[in-house]
Structure formats: C-alpha cells, structure tokens
Amino acid sequence: MNWKRILILACFDLRHSLFRLKGLVFLIPFIFFWYLNLKFLYERGGEVLTTPESIVIISMLYNAQLAQILLILYPPTLSVFLIMTLASTPAFAMLSGNDQLAGDSGRKTFRFLLTRCTRSEIFAGRFISNYLLISLSTLLMAAMATAISLHNDQHPIADIIGYAGHVSLLFLIYTLPFVAYMSVISALMSSALSALLMAVSIYVILIILGNYLQYKSGTAIELLPGGLKEYLFDLNQHDLYIGVGGLLAFTCIYICIGWLIFRRRNI
Amino acid sequence: MTAIIECSNLTRTFGSIRALDDLNITIPARASVGLVGPNGAGKTTLFAMLCGFLHPGKGSITVLGHKPDAARLKGRIGILPQDISLMRGISVHAQMILFARLQGYNKITARQEIDQIIQLVNIGSLVKQFPETLSHGQRKKITLAQALIGKPDLILLDEPTAGLDPVAANEVRNIIQKLRHDHSLIISSHNLDEIRNVCDEIIIIDKGKLVRHSRIDDLIERNNVLTILLDQAAGEPLLQSIKALPPVIRIDTDESNPHRMTVVFQAEKPDQIQFKILEQLQKAGVGIVEFNRGSAFTDRVVELVGKH
C-alpha cells in the first residue's frame, strides 16, 4: 500500500464531502442535533444537570452509582455530552458512511481511480476520510461542550480539560467500529440510499438477534459495538480495557469483512 | 518483441452468458490495435478485465508483464471507459489534478501536466465545470483527457468517437493519430474506417471468442482487388464484359448491396486493368460513386464475423 496515495485520496474525499450531498446528508442533521443540545446545555445545563431528577434519569439508563459519578464527580456537561455522543454515533455513522464506497462503485467512477491506485488504497482512503469527517465534526462539538463546561460546571479547570480529553479519546475509539461497519455495508451495495437502508436494517436485526440470544442463554452477547458503551464509563479500569478492546476487535472484524467484499467486487 | 498484453484461455461469465470464451490474445508493444465485434461481443468486458475492474473467471491475463490489479501497473494504463462520467459535484479540473497526484506528480507538476493535456485535447473552457453539466461529447473529451495523464504506456479507448458530432469526432481522431506514435493503443470501435486509419492490427471477437487477430494489411487485399460502388446495380451484360477482360479472375457481388462489386484480377500493371474496367463502365453508361484499390475493409470484417 502506498500511504501517500491513501492520504491524497482521503484528503480529497474529505474536502469534497463538505460540499457534496454525501457529506451534507450527515452534516446538516449533525449540526442541527448538536445546536439544539449544546444550546440547552449552555442555557440550562448548569442548573438542571446536578438536580436529583437528572440523577434519577441517568440512573434509569445505567445505574445509580454511575449516575452519581457522571453528574457529580465529573463535570456534568461533558458527561451528558459523552452519553449523547455514544448514543448518537451509530445514526451519524450511518448517515456519513453510507456513500463510503457504494455510490462510486455503482456509478463505476472508481474506474478512473483503479488505473492509478490499488483497491486496498481506495478502501483505506475512503475509510480514513469517513472516519475523519465524523471524528473531526464531533471533536469540534467536544470543544464547544468543553467551553460550556468551563462556563457552567463548578469543577477545577484542569479537571474539566483532562476529562474533555478523556471523553474525546473515548468517542474517537467508539466511532471506529461504526465507520468500519459502514465500510462493509457500503462495499456490498451500489447506491448510497440502498447502503443506508441496508445498514439500518442489519443493525436492527442484530439488536433483536442479540437480545434474543441473551434471553435464551442468560449471558450478555454483544453482536454490535453499541453494546460495549457501558464499559467505557470507567468505574474500574478493567471494564474500560474490555470496552476498548472489544471496540477495536469489532473494528478489525468489520474492516476484514469489508475488504474481502470490496476486493472481489466488480467495479 | 515483448508483449504488452497476454490473455490465455480467458473466460468470463455473467450468469448463463459467456461474455468471454477461452480467449487467447497476445499484443506486441507499441502496437495500435483495433478491437472490433458486434454489440455484446465482449469488447468492454475485455477492457474491464485488462484494467482489473472485473476479475477473470478462468484463464490468465498479464498487462505490461503484470497481473491487472498489480500495484506496479498503476499509472501505466490510461482508459477511456464507455459512457462513464467523472465524479459528480466536483470540478473536472480538481479531479484531473487528483488523478495526476495519484500518478506521482506533486502539486506544481500536476498542474503543469494537466495544462498540457488541456491544450492537447482543447478542453480549456470545460475544466472549471462539473461533469454533470457537460454534454455527452464534452464528457467524452474530458474522459479522453484523463486517460492521457502521466503519459501511460498503454491507452485503452472504448468507443472514443461514439455519440460525437462530426467535428468533435474528427478532433478526437486527430488526437488519437498523435498518440499512436508514443503509446501502445487499443481502440474498441464500430467505426471500421477509424480502425483502418489508426491501427496496424485488428482483433475481431464475437460472442466472446476470437475470430481473427491479424495485421490490417494482411486482412485486406490491397493490390489485386478493386472495389467499385456504382450508381446503379450492375447488369449481367456489364459483368460479363468485365469478366471477359483477360486479367480478371472473378467478380464478387453482394446481394444485399447490388451497387457494389469487387473485381479480383491478376496483373503486373494494375493501372491498365483499371482503365479497361472504367472503359466498360462508360460503355454501359453506369456511373461510379466510389472506386477503390483493394478490398473493402468493412466487407472483410463483416464477412469474417458472418462466417463465425
């Protein structure tokens, strides 16, 4: 693999995603979603997040101990930002990644690239550009959430900055398997819309199947990376390692499957 | 001479359809080769396999000594694909710069290379536009231009003049004429005059099988044949009078086109027999639309495909 060509492809795709439908399909809902949520956190977050009602709501989602840690021990604005990021990543990854490979495979425009670079370079270039699009956008929102946290939360500045770095690192890792999942789906399909519908369908099926298997066996069976997000709230370091390791394993598996499909695909 | 392309027992199926069927081809370096055959003969499939777009079902291909998907081959082949446009929503110039950069040019030399190609193909007014805003003919010129970036060793042109107006088609033919001296060319086209004017060799395929691979000069008899297109069907008395000329061996006529006849003769001085035939035509009061030395290339190709 020629990394220079991969970077050229990734930068070109990233730059042009911002002004084309494939990028705008993601960016418009993404910006709208975060505008509303960050506006709420800025205007009312300071007074609402540390109330008992908020702790009860987070306790219902996870557990009481975790809710207290997230909203009292850590800066609550960034904790809520992390929860919302982890919850919304699958949807935004599907919106941003549906045209990773599908559209250009279907329209056969990859033929202009394939005489100049290898399939593996195209695959890697598109994966990286898609990952950069979603992660850089989220990092920008994290910077805004950090600014809001510095304004609203009653924690030392160093703690807030440190926790912001920790939160950013977590969502950068958490995003990886979802982008890789979309590379599998996008390598299979021939249009962005069909890839999006297929991604949603398979995701829902895997959730149902995972729950069914869990119900039958009585043990937690994670068929999707989304099931690992609770491990990321570092109540103890062992759980954090399981979560990060699991996410990286999902990423590797999805990338391998996506590459095997794209390698054999007629373009 | 080393071969630029070697296909051995190449077979490719799409469901129950055999697009290529046990095809064996060897093309020498610096050749200009015309690839002809009826619609669905497998020409575009062959091009797609040479560039690694499609994987061969059976058999093997080497292009410039490498497998089609080899990393070492990248940037050494230029292709004008049939009816495929560049990426939508991105200016032609930006895409051409991308292609040049992928072929190893830096930002400055990429611009210089693209400027040269823009001049060669005369697309200066088109490059700032998006591909979807261009006409079919303009898109064709753009895709031809991108195939020339980086002076590739081998250029594959799939129907380069199809759908172009006569002026644009002529421009493209002139560009191809310039290219043939510096590159190996393979041109797939239904326009046999184009093939005859540009190519040294011809490959005829039909139903995925090789019908003929030869030099064009070997395919058409240039010396002892006259092909004459008349303004009316030649009557039996006229045919008999020409047949009676001593050097004439036979006259071939075509039932589907009775205005055309091919005169095969054996003479050391072919000019004299031409004058004698003209004399007979004048006597019979038959006008001449075309009078060519050599057999008609188109007829020969049609005959070969028909026999297959």
Image (cartoon, rainbow, N blue to C red):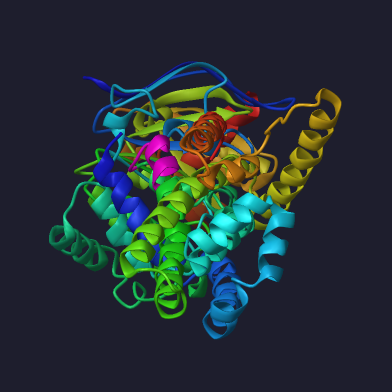
Residue A124 locus on image (x, y percent): 41, 42
Image position of B142 (left or right of A54) = left
- Whether residue B278 is situated above or below residue B272 in the rendered picture: below
Q: Hey, which quadrant is residue B34 in on the image?
A: top left
Residue A121 colored in magenta in the image = yes
Inspect the magenta stretch and tell me whether residue A139 lies in it: no
Name the residue nearer the viewer: B171 or A214: A214
Residue at the spot 63% in from the left edge and 24% down from the top edge:
B307
Relative depth, front residue between B270 and B6: B6
The percent position of residue B97, horizontal first and vertical second, equals 28, 61
Q: Is residue B84 above or below residue A223?
A: below
**Nearer the observer, B181 or B116:** B116
Give the side of residue B138 with respect to residue B19, left or right. left
Q: Which secondary structure is most common in the magenta stretch?
A: helix
Q: Is residue A195 above or below residue A215?
A: below
Report the residue at 53% width, 37% height from top: A243
Quarter where residue B96 is shown: bottom left
Residue A109 position in % (x across, y down)? 49, 52
Residue A102 at x, y percent in the picture: 58, 49
